[in-house]
Amino acid sequence: MFGRRVIYTDEAVITAENVVDVLTKALYVHNQNKAEIDYLWSYYRGKTPILGKTKEIRQSINYKICVNRAHEIVTFKRGYGFGEPIQYIRRGQNESLTEDIDQLNGFMFDQNKQAEDSNLAEWMYVCGLGIRMALPGIDQEEPFHIYTLDPRFSFVVRYNGLGTPAVMGVKFIVKENGATIYSVYSKDRYYEIEDGVLKKIQAHALGEVPIFEYPANEARLGSFEIVLSLLDAINELESNRMDDVVQFVNSF
């Protein structure tokens, strides 16, 4: 557990000819990240190694106590940094922008952005990486939509060059029949790939990859990741302490 890996490609532009190859190579790195995110997410929810504790002697007395400090750490950081909604304000002296900024804040309120920010922060502090998607709306009353994606089923691929710009964003689902559908966005195209086969190509006018990464820090480390061994030791200590208390009482 040393933070999530950045996914790079040597392709500066994603096209119909190279999108499947780039996706295949990116999945190799993403699957490593996904396995670690799965572990950290389960740990945060209380599924820790202490639940597998065994005893060779007096197996009937075998307490498995999870002191969930991981959840406490994430909840504290999340509340401290994202307890209040983010508000946009005017920079500079151009007062004519005030009405536009108020309208933008209204759009963000309608999209429930505070809750989306809080969900994004939860993923950032648990696994070191949050993923957000923004798509156009259907009218002036709702000009865009904001989504917080599960980083186990979404990722961004960056060009391995100066500035490492994002060249491809991916989200995927696994259907009931086991088929995996990948939705791939480049700066001007949408591709749909099913089990390694390009099924759909569609142009879009966004001019940008609509899937964005929010790393918690440069190393992409979760907030409790660097103290996992200490948290495991606390759980083992408390569990063994309870075993000792019960065994000591029973000895009388």
Image: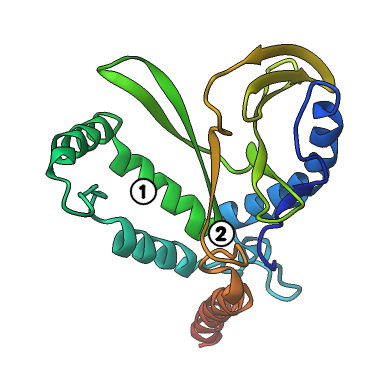
Can residue 46 be spotted in the picture? no
Residue 128 disc label: 2
What kind of element bears circle 2? Answer: loop
**Is there a contact, CB below 8 Å, between mark 2 and mark 1?**
no
* Residue depicted at 50% across the width and 55% down the height: 124
Identity, as a three-letter code, of the amino acid under mark 1: Ser
Residue lying at 76% horizontally and 45% vertically, measured from the top left: 31
Above or below — where is 200 with respect to 228? Answer: above
Type of amino acid at the residue the image marks with label 2: Gly
**Which residue in the structure is indicated by mark 1?**
118
Image spot of residue 232 (x, y percent) = 60, 73
Seen in the image, is 195 located left or right of residue 149?
right
Q: Can you give x and y, in whole percent of width and height, for residue 30 in the image?
A: 74, 45
Residue at the limit of the structure toward the front, as seen here: 94
Q: Nearer the viewer, residue 126 or 136?
A: 136
Residue 156 sits in quarter? top right
- The label shown at residue 174 is none
Classify the position of the N terminus by image quarter.
Answer: bottom right
Q: Earlier in the sequence, mark 2 or mark 1?
A: 1
56 left or right of 247? Answer: right
| Mark 2 nearby-residue class (10 Å; few <14, some 14–19, many ≥20) | many
Residue 102 in percent (x, y) is at 16, 37
